[in-house]
Image (cartoon, helix red, strand yellow):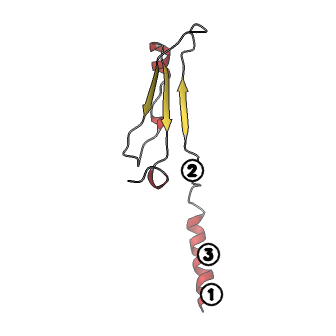
Amino acid sequence: MLQEFSVDLLEKLGFFMAHIPDVSEDCLYLNIYTPAKRAHNTKLPVMVWIHGGGFTIGSASMYDGSALAAYQDVVVVLIQYRLGVLGFLR
């Protein structure tokens, strides 16, 4: 009886499990934007942006540093870090 119930339950859960997207811990990124036209040995200021979201939501991909790098002659670094359970627990 217990074995039949277990097999039936797993078959029903299999339907739901097939629709769960893959989860990955691969979430530590730096997006670096630099001006396209600059002198070879020019030293540029660097701006680092860490997105908000209370360590639970947010993404560096919500911000685009290309315009700032192109028009203001700065290097823009956007940091993508772990969130939620995989991130900084309080």
Label 2: how many Cα within 10 Å (few below 14, some 14–19, many 20+): few
| Tags 2 and 1 touching, CB below 8 Å | no
Position of residue 12 measured from the top left corner of the image (x, y, whole percent): 57, 74
The mark nearer the N terminus, 2 or 3, is: 3
Position of residue 54 measured from the top left corner of the image (x, y, whole percent): 36, 46
Of all residues, the one furthest to the top in this rendering is 39
> Looking at the image, is mark 2 or mark 1 nearer the viewer?
2
Q: Where 44 falls versus 19 (above or below)?
A: above
Q: Where 90 falls versus 79 (above or below)?
A: below
Identified at 59% across, 9% down, the residue is: 41
Q: Quadrant of the N terminus?
A: bottom right
- Give the Cα distance between marks 2 and 3: 28 Å
Identified at 63% across, 81% down, the residue is: 7
Label 3: how many Cα within 10 Å (few below 14, some 14–19, many 20+): few
Identified at 44% across, 52% down, the residue is: 84
Left or right? Give the position of 64 relative to 3.
left
Amino acid type for the residue under numbered disc 2: Glu
Position of residue 83 measured from the top left corner of the image (x, y, whole percent): 46, 48
The mark nearer the N terminus, 2 or 1, is: 1
Secondary structure found at label 1: helix
- Give the Cα distance between marks 1 and 3: 11 Å
Amino acid type for the residue under numbered disc 1: Glu
Q: Quadrant of residue 16?
A: bottom right
In the foreground, 11 or 63: 63
Of all residues, the one furthest to the bottom in this rendering is 1
Amino acid type for the residue under numbered disc 3: Glu
| Tags 1 and 3 touching, CB below 8 Å | no
Q: What residue is shown with label 2?
A: 25
Q: What residue is shown with label 3?
A: 11
Q: Where 78 falls versus 8 (above or below)?
A: above
Q: What residue is shown with label 1?
A: 4
